[in-house]
Image (cartoon, rainbow, N blue to C red):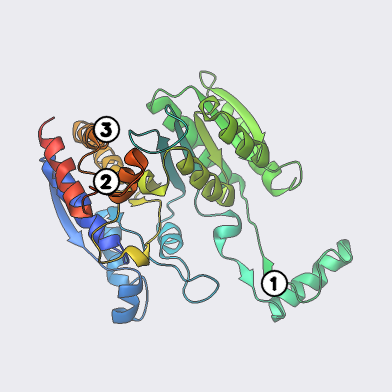
Amino acid sequence: MSHEVVLIPGDGIGPEISAAMRRVVDATGVDIHWREEPAGECAMEEFGTPLPERTCDAVAEVKCAIKGPTTTPIGCGFRSVNVALRHRFDLYANMRPCVSMPGDGSRYTSVDLTVVRENTEDLYAGVEYDSGSPEANHIIQAVDKDFPGKIRPGSAISIKPISPEGSERIVRAAFEYAVDNGRHKVCAVHKANIMKATDGLFMHTAERVAEQYPGIEFETRIVDATCMGLVLDPQQFDVLVLPNLYGDILSDLCAGLVGGLGLAPGANIGKDCAIFEAVHGSAPKHAGKDEANPTALILSAAMMLEHLGEKAAAEAVRQAVRTVLAAGVDVTYDIRRNLTGSTEGAVSCSAYGEAVAKAVMCI
């Protein structure tokens, strides 16, 4: 079967790791027609926007994409391309598996959990008002009637929407993932002890959905206690489901349990569309040096292949990655440093991709 996939290389190290990922996917023998489209800083320079309509049109038509990282300015400039794509295509479920890998340098050796993050609501909905703006002042005045002095004059305002619909569908996605992948436990993470309206809604919705899956163990945990539990004993967790902000933070924490963001894949899933991406950023200081670790994007491609129904190819990619990492020879500088304490003998991003591609063909 032939598949069409939109490839968004991104910027920074994006084009380099995208090329390595593509080499690995092509090695599986799955017939992929790649449709390359721009996004990020490179698109900003050419099109005046980091997310051109032609890219969105391609994703809408094909309904499956994989993207390299894109740069998001901090504290100013345009908003995140990732967030824009998630909202544009209602990619409400962000799936981030965290699995121990050979040579990952972690103190843990058998982590195997998945973070299921709500992707469209919460503080990341982007409903914000600048300090001193008419909108922020209006909200401050309105709130002051019921909660005098709770908001200081001149505050910037960010609104945290949590809906019953958004909560139910992400929790259901977590349980369905557990059922489909032979998982045994779902933990809903919240801060309902303080944010009783928003996080309380999320927690109570999760409790109601859990009743429909009696074969899956269920618990709720406060987010700060969950952070401590992950560091103390990550093996107690299986599937974590969280609102947007907590999911973003905890997924990076979980990546730290398995060697860092360079080994962390991700998928954004909606009803009609899916976009796969590495969890890490564009690392501009490494751009153009052919030294970045493409493992996260390669493992994201494995998730994409599974989504396309190519499960054997997906498993071949995962096994090939483990084989190359375990051998510890044709690995990038970060893995080499984990294994030997030195970067001496590390290979380039493209050479690592070639090694994984060859391993795929031997499976």
**Residue underneath mark 1:** 156
Which numbered tag is attached to residue 326?
Answer: 3
168 sits to left or right of 193: left
Q: CA distance from mark 2 to mark 1?
A: 40 Å
Distance from the alpha carbon under mark 3 to that under mark 2: 16 Å
Q: Label 1 to label 3, Cα distance in Å? A: 49 Å
Residue 35: quadrant of the picture? bottom left
Residue picked out by circle 2:
298
Helix, strand or loop at mark 2: helix
Q: Earlier in the sequence, mark 3 or mark 2?
A: 2
**Is residue 302 in sight in this rendering?**
yes
Q: Quadrant of the C terminus?
A: top left
Q: Amino acid at mark 1?
A: Ala
Q: Name the kind of residue labelled 3 in the image.
A: Ala
Q: Secondary structure at mark 3?
A: helix
> In the image, which is nearer the foreground, mark 1 or mark 3?
3
Q: Quadrant of the N terminus?
A: top left
Q: Is residue 86 left or right of residue 133?
A: left
Q: Residue at x 61, y 45 (%)?
A: 164
Does residue 275 appear left or right of residue 238 in this picture? Answer: left
Residue at horizontal 25%, vertical 64%? 289
Q: Residue furthest top?
A: 215
Q: Are marks 1 and 3 in contact (CB under 8 Å)?
A: no
